[in-house]
Image: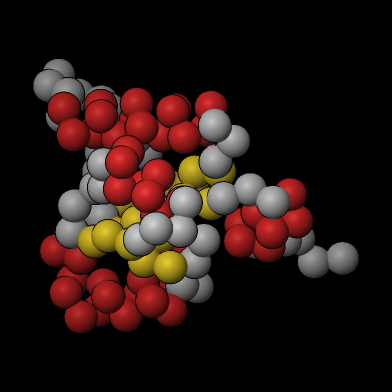
């Protein structure tokens, strides 16, 4: 039997899925090096908050997860059109909700509740 993709898994267990397609970074979280980026610290805190509420959060980097980009038609089209400035791209349950900047927790929660 073929393994389920992220969206199929969420439908199977009735969870919401947030996918973040990150710009190039030095490590998977960007939380490395001598000076930490406050935006990435805030993003990490938001991810932990969402996960504590049962939301599945996946992060992808082109260098580490090229297939995640290539397999998402909307994401790869946006990257081809706007290049690196399209990143980060945030996708909720298969729909792009924000690009070029990370969303706030309020924006994510609004989109998760279907109010976006």
Q: Position of residue 76 (x, y in %)?
A: 35, 75
One can see residue 20 in this view: no
- The foreground one among 30 and 40 is 40
20 vs 71: above or below: above
Q: Residue at x 20, y 80 (%)?
A: 81
Q: Position of residue 26 (x, y in %)?
A: 25, 39
86 vs 48: above or below: below
One can see residue 38 in this view: yes
Q: Residue at x 43, y 79 (%)?
A: 73
- The foreground one among 71 and 38 is 38
Q: Which colour assignment does the render follow?
A: secondary structure
Q: Position of residue 47 (x, y in %)?
A: 41, 34
Q: Residue at x 14, y 63 (%)?
A: 85
Can you say which quadrant of the picture contains the N terminus?
Answer: bottom right
Q: Position of residue 33 (x, y in %)?
A: 19, 24
56 vs 37: above or below: below
Q: Residue furthest top?
A: 34
Q: Residue furthest front?
A: 115
**Which image quadrant is residue 65 in?**
bottom left
- Looking at the image, residue 34 sits to the left or right of residue 80; the answer is left
In the rendered picture of this protein, how many numbered marks are placed on residues? 0
Can you say which quadrant of the picture contains the C terminus?
Answer: bottom left
34 vs 5: above or below: above
- Looking at the image, residue 30 sits to the left or right of residue 59; the answer is left
- Looking at the image, residue 65 sits to the left or right of residue 107; the answer is right
């Amino acid at each position: 039997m073929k393994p389920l993709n992220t969206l199929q898994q969420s439908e199977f267990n009735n969870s919401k899925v947030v996918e973040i397609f990150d710009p190039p970074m030095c490590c998977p979280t960007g939380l490395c090096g001598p000076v930490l980026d406050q935006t990435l610290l805030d993003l990490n805190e938001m991810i932990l908050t969402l996960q504590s509420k049962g939301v599945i959060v996946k992060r992808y980097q082109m260098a580490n997860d090229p297939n995640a980009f290539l397999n998402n038609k909307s994401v790869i089209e946006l990257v081809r059109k706007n290049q690196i400035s399209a990143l980060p791209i945030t996708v909720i349950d298969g729909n792009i909700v924000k690009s070029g900047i990370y969303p706030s927790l309020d924006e994510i929660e609004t989109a998760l509740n279907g109010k976006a």
